[in-house]
Amino acid sequence: MRIQVSLLALVALTATVVAAQPAVTIAGLFDLSGGGAIWGKSERFAFELAVSDFKSRHPGVQVHAVVEDSQYSSKQTASALQKLISIDKARYVVGTTWETTAVMMPICESRKVVCISPSYHGREYYSRPWRYNFTAWFEDKGYMSALVSQMNARGYRRVAVFSAISSYYDQLVESYLDLTREKPLVIERVVLDDRDFRSTITKTPENLDAIVMLLDNAGQIQAFLKQWSELRKDRPDVYTDDLIVYLDPPEDVSRYGFVFYYSAPVFDAEQLSEFSQRYEKAFGAAPDGSSAAVAYDETMIVLECALADPAVEAVRECVANTKGYHGYSGTFSFNGRQTVTDRQIVASKLG
């Protein structure tokens, strides 16, 4: 009889503790309608899948998840973040997509909100010792490091660089100039909505060994390739980032006769396959962006940290000291830092 009473008391105590625990509010801020929407929508669904999985593992924990659209706009990113903090009372934010993350960082720091980016790891993370800003994404300059290593090994001497103007591509161009053995003959920068490259292509020197093509979206890439093929017969090797893999190679790339090399993050194939299967089962299609698995892992890390202690300072400390996390995007650690270790980017040939 005493044992029965003790068990009843334990059940009652557990129920009281769970009921007393405050609800965890976690926010997702992703590009759902702008230039990064292919990745942003995948990040959003991965975020929701992680929240659902967390609730299934911890049915007694209340989780309130809210999502906003950054629209791939600095102004909208800042506005949406302030809304999530002030109105939704979010103290942990996963987002945003690509380099608009840089707009969030000072806001997160001043408002003491834990923010973690699923698809940006730029130089801003090294400008100061951030306390509330984290990223589990692959370091941006690694994209170019992988390409330049291969280009140096091939001994290219005549190279032209064509790059969009953005924080991400600025860093890639700087990394190229720092690492290359041969300075480029031409560096041309273009705005994000530019689609006419004819003048630039015409005045580009002949007999190039390679082109470094760092354009911002499928429309720019398609326009550049089409116009080059119409104006010139030479086909230098093309080096770019993994945006090229989101085009349809038989229709949009291979028909122009270029050989492409691109840099891309390395994921754990087995884990990523499992994630993709679960994602497709939940949402009816495979994830479009490479960052979906990272968004899932980040969301789960933050929620597990909040489960241990929901206080912002405790969550911040918990994320920073995550070590050997084995997630869908691979195994990685923060090791007391604001950025992850153990991430690798490699260069591959397309097709």
Image (cartoon, rainbow, N blue to C red):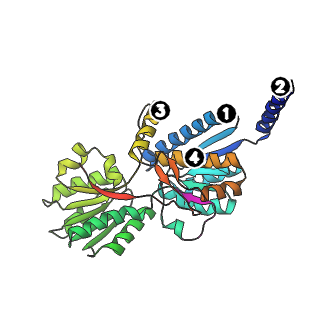
Judging by the rendered image, the residue that carries numbered circle 4 is 299
Residue contact at pointers 1 and 3, CB within 8 angstroms: no
Mark 2 neighbour density, 10 Å: few (under 14) some (14–19) many (20 or more): few
Judging by the rendered image, the residue that carries numbered circle 3 is 283
- The secondary element bearing badge 3 is classed as helix
Judging by the rendered image, the residue that carries numbered circle 1 is 59
Residue lying at 61% horizontally and 38% vertically, measured from the top left = 54
Q: Position of residue 121 (x, y in %)?
A: 48, 60
User: Which range is magenta?
Assistant: 127-135
Q: Position of residue 123 (x, y in %)?
A: 48, 67
Point out the frontmost of discs 2 and 1: 2
Q: Position of residue 179 (x, y in %)?
A: 34, 73
Label 3 to label 4: alpha-carbon separation: 18 Å
- The secondary element bearing badge 1 is classed as loop
Q: Name which of mark 1 and mark 4 comes first in the sequence.
A: 1
Q: Name which of mark 1 and mark 3 comes first in the sequence.
A: 1
In the rendered view, tell whether residue 141 sits above or below residue 283: below
Residue 4: numbered disc: 2
